[in-house]
Structures are given as C-alpha cells and as structure tokens.
Image: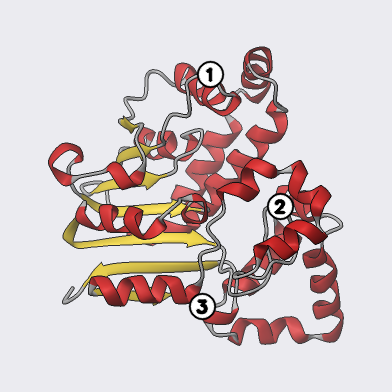
Amino acid sequence: MSLQKRLETFIEEIPQQRLADAIGEAADISPQQVLHTYINETRVALRLIEGTLEKDKQALEVGAGLCLFSLFLKQQGYQITALEPGAGGFDAFTIAKRVILDLYHSIPLPIIERPAQALNPAKDGQFDLIFSNNVVEHIPGFEQALAALNRCLVEDGIMIHGCPNYFVPYEPHLQIPVIKNWPTLSERVFRHQVEAKRAIWESLNFISYFDVKRFAEMGGLQISFRQGLLYQAFKRLDEDEAFRRRQAGSAIASIYRLLKITGLIYLIKRLPAALATPMVFELRKNGR
C-alpha cells in the first residue's frame, strides 16, 4: 500500500468527534475547523517530502502544529522528531495539541518545544531531512532560524520548506492583497480582515523568493525551487474540498474561474518561481 493510501487510512481512523469534544471542553475555539485544517495539511506535507523519506534517516518537522503528520510518520516506522514550541501552556492551540498527544500516547514521538532559532546540534542532534509546511512565514528573524536548522543538518542532508512568496502581492491567510515592503497599506485598507486575524497578521514576516535566494548565497548553500506550484495551488480549488471552502469568495477563487474560462490556467505552469506563490525551496550544503 502506498504511503498516501496509508495516510488516508490514518486520517479515517482519527476519532474526530471525540477529539473535537475534548478540545471544545478545554479551549474556546472551533475544534472541527481546527481539526479539518490540520488533517488536510497532512496531505500537503506528505506531497512536500514523500520522495525524500527514508526509514533509516532522521527527519525533523519544523512547526509540527498538532503533530498529526509527525505521529503518522512515526507510526509508519520513520525516525521523525516534531519541533513545535510551547506557547504558554494554556492557550487554545497548546490544549488542542495536548489532547491529540494524549490520545496517541502509544506512539513514542520525540517533541522539541523550543523555537527553531534555539536549536543546536550538540543538544538536539542532526537530521538528514528537515522540513516545514506553511511555517517559515511565521518565524520572526527567519534567517536565524534557517541558519540554526542548517547547523542541525547532516552534510548530505536536505531542507525542504513550503511557504508563501510575498514578492507576489497576496496574503493567503487573510486572502487580501499585500505589498511586501508596505504592509501597513493593506492593514489600513483591509482593516476588518486584519483585525479578525490580528495574531496571524502580526506573526507574518513577508518572506519572498529573493529573501531566500539571498540567504542561501550568504550561507554558501545550494538552493532550488520547485516549478508549477501556483498551478497546483489553483488546482486545489477543484480537488481539495477543505481548501475550496477556505477560499470561498476570495479573489483567488474568482481569478481561477477567469483563468479556466480563458484557458490561461495552463500558462501558469510556465511561470518562474520568483513570480509564483506558494513556493517550495530546497536547501543543501554546497558540494552536495
């Protein structure tokens, strides 16, 4: 059975109502929405790294969230560690994570509850694969975090990170236009949307393709970007029900309909990575 099919089996066996009830009793959040979002993102994370997984290699998931994907990989026999910093111990997200880890207590998942910037190989070890999905854009001083992760990467290892490219003037979490060097303009124009997700907005560092390129050059790292990701993101509107619901009524949904009608959607595949969002970049140490 393929790993994708095993993931679907894992997802089907998640007692979502039981988890939702436990989370709802402990935290003032919408547990169904939180669970659906994180469950759906496990599929995205698997597509991100599936071709690089090896059971005898050490992997680190950065920003593991509710740890569902790391729990799945550990269940399947992969040597995975989850990095997910604690946030005070009593916030809704931390409570939801604790409920899930309690449910899957039989899976011995190693968890590091410190920021990526605080990692060091002497204490945390080194990894063959380090990856994250929609995390880097929320890390303040992401350059320091990537540098720390690089120190924890073995010589022939690889880092894979997926995140928005804010050179493209669009913010996917809030679904609003944003100019990378002038975010206060969007904050003023889209005041209500920003206030509704103030914590997310303030966490954003507006990372771009060119920021990552510059980081790699300064650190002597090899970097490559995957192509066709904007096209894949548009196609998720057809193939991913949870993603389609989150984007309902957004500019992205309207643009996609126009691109399909005109046939221009197929030209999106040819866009260079610098002009596409999201982006997936891979980092390796030079000479490897």
Looking at the rendered structure, the kind of residue marked 1 is: Phe
Picture coordinates of residue 53, whole percent (x, y):
33, 54
Query: Are dots 2 and 1 in contact, CB under 8 Å?
Result: no
Amino acid, disc 3: Gln
Whether residue 199 sits left or right of residue 283 in the image: it is: right
Sequence-first tag of 2 and 3: 3
Q: CA distance from mark 2 to mark 1?
A: 29 Å
Residue that mark 1 sits on:
90
Give the residue at mark 2: 243
Point out the tag, 3 or 1, that comes first from the N-terminus.
Answer: 1
Q: Earlier in the sequence, mark 2 or mark 1?
A: 1
Front residue of this view, candidates 214 and 133: 214
Q: Is residue 130 left or right of residue 13?
A: left
Q: What is the distance, in whole Å, between disc 3 and disc 1 at their CAs?
A: 41 Å
Labels 3 & 1 near each other (Cβ < 8 A): no
Q: Position of residue 60 (x, y in %)?
A: 32, 45
Residue on which disc 3 sits: 227
